[in-house]
Image (cartoon, helix red, strand yellow):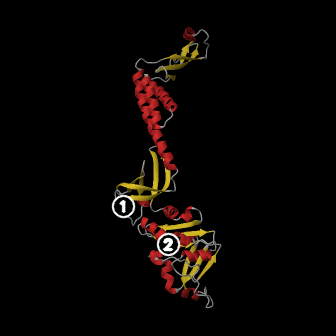
């Protein structure tokens, strides 16, 4: 093995950011494997690389015995004493067994191991770079589309957006820029794999964090998100400071902040409601934009019965039950909605109760989300 090979390994290590010693160790292991394979040897061998001299030698480790039964593993005491009179039975002796044409085998092994190590190192660099982006939003460019996946270029890696994670209302086109939510990053045998989504609730949460400075700074907190991607979402927000309007902060001046997110999600309607530790207030808010007369709470079953004006019943339930379903997801409470007339017939509401109760008003321009 010439010194040029060591120089090439050193230069490649610097270029790819791989420690030269790692490449040398890997090369030694590859040479041992190549020796055993090419020379049908099962012996315990060691490879010695001399970087300064640019040479390589192979040594077979054998046990000194009185009578040899396996010539690949053992050497007789008489033969051992010819090498060094001090050898005794059961000593380990190293005998050089470097083949004449081992330089060719070494060159092949070097090429294979360096290629493999470089590939592993590059994969490691990519994995390290993207591992920190888990549960974050990244912007990519759609490269191609087939019946199962949308392939998104995220820079050094291509991620697959599966059909289950796509927004059903979204039309994907090659070369479109797309914001995606990174659900998981794995280092597999085939290299780093990034799992992305456009339908995950985390995408909505991250978009608000990016668009609303008060959320990014921790002044306003996102307590919960419920989403039916491409159609409608609800997000509950809260601020410790009573002088901060968490809903208004998210909506922005003339609805500018939330409208940016609506545009990114291709028209997905978003209800922003104020979180409360009081389930009566929280459930009332969550059913926005409908008005609520009363909320009856069953703490043991974590369920509520919500009474709304007759003319608000369909709005409270929503199309195909969507509004009620999202409110239940958002709050974590079961919600049973009854009209005022039905509630009075069941004795759940008396004439004296204030039928103008609407919970906590949320000053959001409803037209913005309709």
Q: Residue furthest right?
A: 300
- Depth check: give the residue in front, 354 or 244: 244
Q: Give the number of the mark in front: 1 or 2.
A: 2
Question: 277 left or right of 189?
Answer: right
Q: Do the residues labelled 1 and 2 touch (CB within 8 Å)?
A: no
Any mark on residue 97, and which? none
At x 51% / y 29%, what residue is drawn? 25
Quarter the N terminus occupies: top left
Q: Which residue lies furthest to the front in this view?
A: 253
Q: In which quarter of the image is residue 280?
A: bottom right
Looking at the rendered structure, the secondary structure element under dot 1 is loop
Residue 362: image location, x then y, percent: 55, 77
Mark 1 or mark 2, which has the lower sequence index? 1
Q: In this view, does 88 lie above or below 105?
A: above
- Inter-mark Cα distance, 1 to 2: 31 Å
Quarter the C terminus occupies: bottom left
At x 41% / y 24%, what residue is drawn? 105
- Number of marks in picture: 2
Looking at the rendered structure, the secondary structure element under dot 2 is helix
Instruction: Report which residue position mark 1 lands on.
Output: 172
Neighbour class for label 1 at 10 Å: few (<14), some, many (≥20)? some
Q: Is residue 277 above or below residue 347?
A: above
Neighbour class for label 2 at 10 Å: few (<14), some, many (≥20)? few
Question: 265 left or right of 283?
Answer: left
Instruction: Report which residue position mark 2 lands on.
Output: 253
- Depth check: give the residue in front, 92 or 326: 326
Residue 266: image location, x then y, percent: 41, 67
């Amino acid at each position: 093995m010439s010194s040029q090979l060591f120089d090439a390994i050193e230069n490649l290590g610097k270029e790819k950011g791989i420690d030269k010693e790692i490449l040398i160790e890997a090369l030694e292991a590859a040479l041992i494997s190549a020796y055993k394979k090419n020379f049908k040897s099962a012996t315990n061998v060691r490879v010695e690389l001399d970087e300064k001299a640019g040479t390589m030698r192979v040594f077979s480790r054998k046990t000194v015995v009185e009578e040899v039964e396996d010539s690949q593993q053992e050497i007789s005491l008489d033969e051992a004493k010819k090498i060094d009179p001090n050898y005794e039975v059961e000593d380990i002796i190293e005998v050089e067994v470097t083949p004449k044409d081992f330089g060719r085998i070494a060159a092949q092994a070097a090429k294979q191991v360096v290629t493999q190590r470089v590939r592993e190192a590059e994969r490691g660099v990519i994995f390290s770079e993207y591992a920190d982006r888990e549960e974050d939003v990244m912007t990519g460019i759609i490269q191609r589309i087939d019946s199962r996946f949308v392939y998104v270029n995220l820079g050094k890696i291509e991620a697959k957006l599966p059909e289950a994670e796509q927004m059903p209302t979204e039309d994907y086109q090659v070369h479109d820029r797309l914001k995606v939510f990174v659900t998981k990053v794995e280092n597999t045998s085939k290299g780093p794999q990034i799992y992305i989504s456009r339908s995950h609730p985390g995408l909505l949460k991250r978009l608000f964090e990016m668009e609303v400075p008060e959320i990014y700074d921790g002044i306003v907190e996102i307590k919960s998100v419920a989403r039916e991607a491409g159609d409608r979402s609800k997000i509950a927000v809260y601020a410790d400071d009573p002088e901060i309007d968490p809903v208004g902060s998210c909506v922005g001046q003339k609805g500018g902040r939330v409208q940016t997110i609506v545009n990114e999600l291709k028209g997905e309607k978003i209800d922003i409601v104020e979180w409360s530790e009081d389930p009566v207030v929280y459930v009332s808010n969550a059913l926005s934009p409908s008005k609520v007369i009363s909320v009856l709470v069953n703490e043991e079953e974590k369920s509520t019965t919500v009474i709304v004006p007759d003319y608000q019943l369909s709005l409270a339930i929503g199309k195909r039950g969507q509004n009620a379903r999202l409110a239940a997801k958002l709050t974590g409470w079961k919600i049973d909605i009854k009209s005022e007339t039905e509630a009075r017939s069941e004795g759940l509401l008396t004439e004296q109760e204030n039928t103008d109760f609407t919970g906590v008003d949320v000053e959001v321009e409803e037209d913005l989300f309709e």
